[in-house]
Amino acid sequence: MDDLTPLRYFRAAYELGTFSAAARACDVRQPSVSAAIARLEGHYGGVLFRRSRDGLTPTPLGQELYQQAGGVLAQVNRLEARLKGHVTQIARVYCAPDVFMAPFDAGLARIRMAEARVQFQFTDDLTQADLLFCDKGCLPRGCGFNPLWQDRYGVGLPQGHALLAAGSLTLADLAGQAIIARPYCPSADQFLTGLQRADAPAGMIVAASATHDAQLMDLVAAGLGIALMPMSHADVHRGVILRDVAGIDSVTRIVGVGFRKTDFAAGIARHFLSRDTILTTAPVAAGAF
């Protein structure tokens, strides 16, 4: 076929597992990917994928086409890179609202040094990002993931709060406390549900709702209420002190670097992770990557 676009869409669908994920990766609408696959199936006279609720499963014909097309597309990509080497490449980055950027600064700097033409563009749409800094549980389907640290949750209180007199908190201590809600954080919702189901009813009152954790900590420091938050936030804000809560099952998250399974995104992720990643129980300090 003269037009290589259908092969590009096919390769994305093969690697990402769904037509919708392939469409996002190729910056087109899903019908364009579906139509391209149909053209290839008509051209080669056979079905390339079996469709199911779990996604796409390549047929033997699809597997053969993927193996053969990979070399062709790689050669074309190298040619385009030589001819268009002066063109800036946009790396779209998503940082979850409950994750702070500081631990990732050094990794981004390494990408910039390795790929001088890469320009970072931050996005609020995690489905459109090449790199994602987030909890593993929030990762879109079809993305790769490298874990960096494991986090447990506790309660953040403002400086001078009466509950700070105790070394640790119990469910009874939280009764009647005003809380700052984090509707963007599934793990915090799980923690709050555990509090509500516990034997000692917390009776916590929602006093405000934050849109990200930087704002959350400012609201706590201002005395508007306490908040459920990752214990790794302990040294982020001088006006907020974190405490564990006894008597409730621990809720944890795994934070790391996600990436779309495209050549470009996987390449910059490799630059970001310049060493073998080790899952720890504390955040990796900025500059330690």
Image: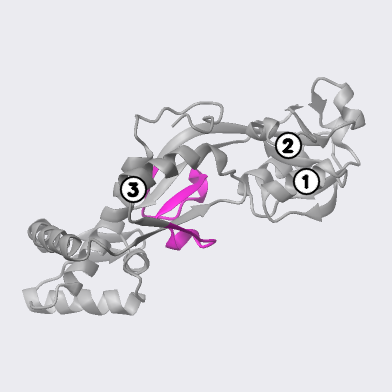
Q: Position of residue 165 (x, y in %)?
A: 89, 22
Q: Is residue 227 magenta?
A: no
Which of pointers 3 and 1 lies earlier in the amino acid sequence? 1
User: Relative to 186, is 285 on the left or the right?
Assistant: left
What residue does disc 3 label?
268
Q: CA distance from mark 3 to mark 2?
A: 31 Å
Tell me the element at label 2: loop
Q: Position of residue 276 (x, y in %)?
A: 35, 29
Q: CA distance from mark 1 to mark 2?
A: 8 Å
Tell me the element at label 1: helix
What residue does disc 2 label?
237
What residue does disc 1 label?
218
- Which amino acid lies under the numbered mark 1 shown in the image of this protein? Asp
- Which amino acid lies under the numbered mark 3 shown in the image of this protein? Ile
Quarter location, residue 39: bottom left
* Residue 255 visible here: no
Q: Is residue 127 magenta?
A: yes
The magenta segment is 120-145
